[in-house]
Image (cartoon, rainbow, N blue to C red):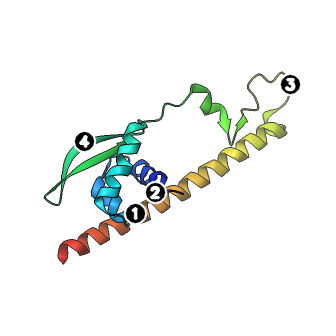
Amino acid sequence: MDLEEEAYNIVRRHKDGVFQNVIWKELDIDSRKCSRIIKKLLDKDLIIREVGVSNGARTYLLKAKEEVKEKYDLLLSREMFSACTGCTCDCEPEYCGRLSEWIGNLMIEGNEKSEETEETEENEENIEDQEESEEEI
């Protein structure tokens, strides 16, 4: 994964926004390189940038633009379309193999998303701990 993707993923993980200085510290790059990466993300219209202050220093608060989900995305589960949509079979849902597979995929997706959430929360806690220890120094 290149730095641009990593920076975008950091911004997406922070739903309320993340300060630009947090990104360059987390990616272990200098602020100039981070500014160039952020400029590319802005040019691609992936993020928005607002002026902000972090620890008394002027910086930017970055937020990912909301992804517009197509309405049919709710019927997808791991690229499998809902088994019952358009189905003409006269079956009982409890015994339908296609429906069971689709529901199984939903459960797998839910587990993957909860694991991502746990990782994100752990990373955020680590960042906060690092910022607190930097402030103490």
Mark nearer the N terminus (1 vs 3) = 1
At 75% from the left and 28% from the top, the residue drawn is 84
**Residue matched to label 4:** 50
Decide if residue 120 is on the left or right side of residue 112: left
| Callouts 1 and 2 close, C-beta under 8 Å | yes
Q: Residues within 10 Å of mark 3 (few under 14, many from 20)?
A: few
Q: What element carries label 1?
A: loop
Task: Give the percent coordinates (x, y) of residue 101.
Answer: 78, 43
| Callouts 1 and 4 close, C-beta under 8 Å | no
The amino acid type found where label 2 is placed reads Leu
- Seen from the viewer's position, the closer of residues 45 and 56 is 45
- Seen from the viewer's position, the closer of residues 2 and 23 is 2
| Callouts 3 and 4 close, C-beta under 8 Å | no
The amino acid type found where label 3 is placed reads Cys
Q: Tag on residue 89?
A: 3
Mark nearer the N terminus (1 vs 2) = 2
CA distance for labels 1 and 3: 53 Å
Q: How crowded is mark 1: few (under 14 residues within 10 Å), some or many (20 or more)?
A: few
**Residue matched to label 1:** 27
The amino acid type found where label 1 is placed reads Leu
At 31% from the left and 63% from the top, the residue drawn is 30
The number of discs equals 4
Mark nearer the N terminus (1 vs 4) = 1
Q: Residues within 10 Å of mark 2 (few under 14, many from 20)?
A: few
**Residue matched to label 2:** 3
Q: Tag on residue 8?
A: none
